[in-house]
Image (cartoon, grey):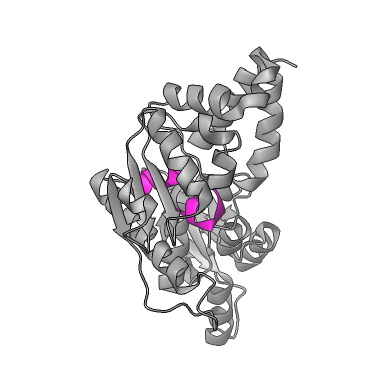
Amino acid sequence: MIVSELSTQVNDLLRPMGITRNLSAYSILCQCLELVCEQEDRLQAVEKDIYTPIADRRGCEPKAIQSAADAIHGDLGMIREEDVVICVSKSGNTPEIKVLIPLIRNNGNNNIVAMVSNTDSFLAKNSLYVLKAKVEKEACPLNLAPTNSTTAQLVLGDALAMCLVECRSFSSRDFARFHPGGSLGKRLYTRVSDVYDGTNRPCITREAGIRPVILAMSKGRLGAVAIVDGEERLEGIITDGDLRRMMEKYDDVDGLTAKDVMSKSPKTISEDELAYNAYRMMEQNSITQLVVVDKDRHYKGMVHIHDILREGVV
């Protein structure tokens, strides 16, 4: 199977999950497939033959999380000389640690950071830096199983991550590139153009009667209809709420037109805006739809709150 065919199949598989061609995750996956197509046995050494080449292409470092036991039973080869190795242990004196540390150093890597409770341990004494994660007592009633100590290590890990965010000027744009999955990622990359249906464009002119307004609104099934001029520039909006207020105000509606009922200043948004920002605007204004327009206020369609919820943005 050629790479282009694989790329098409990958796109069909990942698009429903929100992973589209404009994301770095998509291009990384395609690059991995390209390497595998060139040489299938690369799957036998993923860390060496796939992770490292992809990282080199993208100008970054491959990362891995593994146990000490796995490392000394074959996975040590993924650790390179220039890598930073963070070893997490409570005692710092386990047999695996005592075997692992000398092996890492023998491979020319001295960039070892210990996250450990016992600062007099073998791990602490053989590391370049030591992060002390000591607690007075474990939550375990026997004071044996690491519980409070693992929580302390998690806190230190979060602190390290936040320091790196600050040092590397990591932005929300970077977050969207490297964390496209889940609602957090979707908030940062999913745009209005990705969620609204540009072919469903309920609209009518301001001279139209109430009956055509109701029919257009019913056909669009968005709870609103846009009022446009002859060049399809937005002039206003009529929502189902406007129709209810009209019925309360007028005894006879036969002579009314769209301009008598419409709101002249509807909330609008560009299709290039983030979908999450559209959701926030709806939430702040207690409405369920926004009119999508271009820079010249030409009517493009409507984005409904259900469109955004359906995509899992919030």
Front-lying residue, 292 or 158: 158
Image coordinates of residue 283 in percent, x first then y, are 45, 71
- Where residue 174 sits in the image (x, y, percent)? 38, 43
Q: Was residue 176 drawn as part of the magenta stretch in this picture?
A: yes
- Judge left or right: residue 33 versus residue 287: right
The span picked out in magenta is 172-187
Where on the picture, by quarter, is residue 303? Answer: bottom right
Residue 202 falls in image quadrant: bottom right
What's the residue at 50%, 40% (across, down)? 64
Q: How many marks?
A: 0
Is residue 141 covered in magenta? no
User: Relative to 64, does residue 153 appear above or below in the rendering?
Assistant: below
Task: Report the front residue among 2 and 79.
Answer: 79
Position of residue 210 in the picture relative to residue 114 (left or right): right
Q: Position of residue 176 (x, y in %)?
A: 44, 46
Q: Residue at x 64, y 62 (%)?
A: 217
Q: Name the residue rendered at 54%, 25% in the picture.
A: 48
- Which one is nearer the viewer's eye here, 122 or 304? 122
Looking at the magenta stretch, what is its main secondary structure?
Answer: helix
Q: Seen from this angle, which residue lies furthest right?
A: 1
Which residue is rendered at x = 62% and y = 62% of the image?
222
Query: Observer-nearest residue: 208 or 112?
Result: 112
Res 298 seen here: no
Q: Residue furthest left?
A: 167
Q: Examine the rendered structure and indicate whether residue 244 appears above or below residue 180.
A: below
- Using the image, determine if residue 64 lies above or below residue 277: above
307 relative to 80 in the view: left or right: right
